[in-house]
Structure formats: C-alpha cells, structure tokens
Amino acid sequence: MSEISEITGGCLCNGTRLTAKNVSKRVGACHCGTCRKWSGGPFMALDCGTEVTLEGEENITVFNSSMWAERGFCNKCGCHLFYRLKGNQQYIVPVGLLENRDEFEMDHQVFIDEKPEYYAFANETEDMTGAEVFAKYGPSAD
C-alpha cells in the first residue's frame, strides 16, 4: 500500500495545525479501555510516523498517559490531536482530525479482545489482541 506524501489537519478552533509527511493510508481502530475512554469510542487513527510538524504549540497540552506514550490535545477547544510514542516520537493521529481523504483504508484493529459487544465494523481487518500487540511491538504499543 502506498503512502500519502503530505497531509494536514487541525483542531476545531484552528488553534493548532498538524502537517505530516510520508503517511500510511492504513486506518486502524484501537479498542483498549484507555483509548475508548479518551475518544468516547474506538480510537480511529492513522500512523503519521515521526515527520510531523505542529503549529500553535502554545495551545497544545500533553498528557502522560502511560510509561511509553503521551496524548496531546488542544487546550482551547479540547480536540484530541495525537497519541505519541515516547521512545521514537511516532505520532498516531485521529483520522477525523485530518483533511478528508478518500484513499484511506481501514484495515486493522488492535486490542480486539477489549472491544465491547455493542458495536462492530463491517470492514475485513487484521485483528490483534492486546497480547499480540505487545508481542509484536513490545511495550511501546497501547
């Protein structure tokens, strides 16, 4: 699957903007309890890698959510901006934050063993349990 050379997005109040380069088109859903609490449902996100530029940093608050990751949000409008791995500064960004792209493809779900029964996606996806995520990616995945 190819990449998007550059993508942009921003929060509700436009107080923060994000630009990412060489981004995967693969959208994933995380069903872990922390992501569901943070996003109000499954966390639908795109791996934006490490080539990310943020504007409006004075409006960004970062929450230390685990030993391996932190989450950023706009402190003006509350919009969720990113999940960032501490070890390599990899950004996982809510797909709804980014400019609409028809070429996105939802193809994976993680922490499928924590997904509540009250929703399901019709897409055929690669599904991984929490244990499988940690086994594949180590402690830097949540």
Image: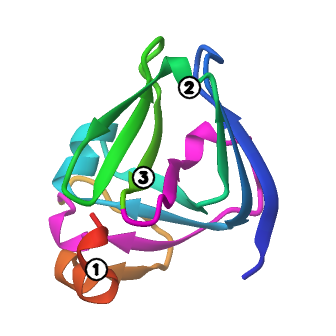
Along the polypeptide, which appears first: circle 1 or circle 2?
A: 2
Residue 10 image point, x, y percent: 65, 30
Q: Is residue 32 visible?
A: yes
- Circle 1: residue type: Val
| Residue beneath disc 2 | 57
Q: Badge 3, how many Cα within 10 Å: few under 14, some, many 20+?
A: many
Q: Secondary structure at mark 3?
A: strand
Q: Nearer the viewer, residue 124 or 11?
A: 11
**97 falls in the magenta region:** yes
Relative depth, front residue between 30 and 52: 52
Give above or below for 57 relative to 50. Answer: above
Kindly identify which residue carries mark 3: 84
Q: Badge 2 local density, few (<14 within 10 Å), some, or many (20+)?
A: few
Residue highlighted by disc 1 = 133
Question: Is residue 104 found inside the magenta-colored segment of the image?
Answer: yes
In percent of width and height, residue 118 lies at 22, 53
Q: Is residue 100 visible?
A: no
Taking the image as shown, residue 64 lies to the left or right of residue 97, namely: left
Q: Position of residue 136 (x, y in %)?
A: 32, 88
Amino acid type shown at disc 3: Arg
The magenta stretch is 87-116
Mark 2 residue element = helix
Position of residue 45 measured from the top left corner of the image (x, y, whole percent): 50, 55
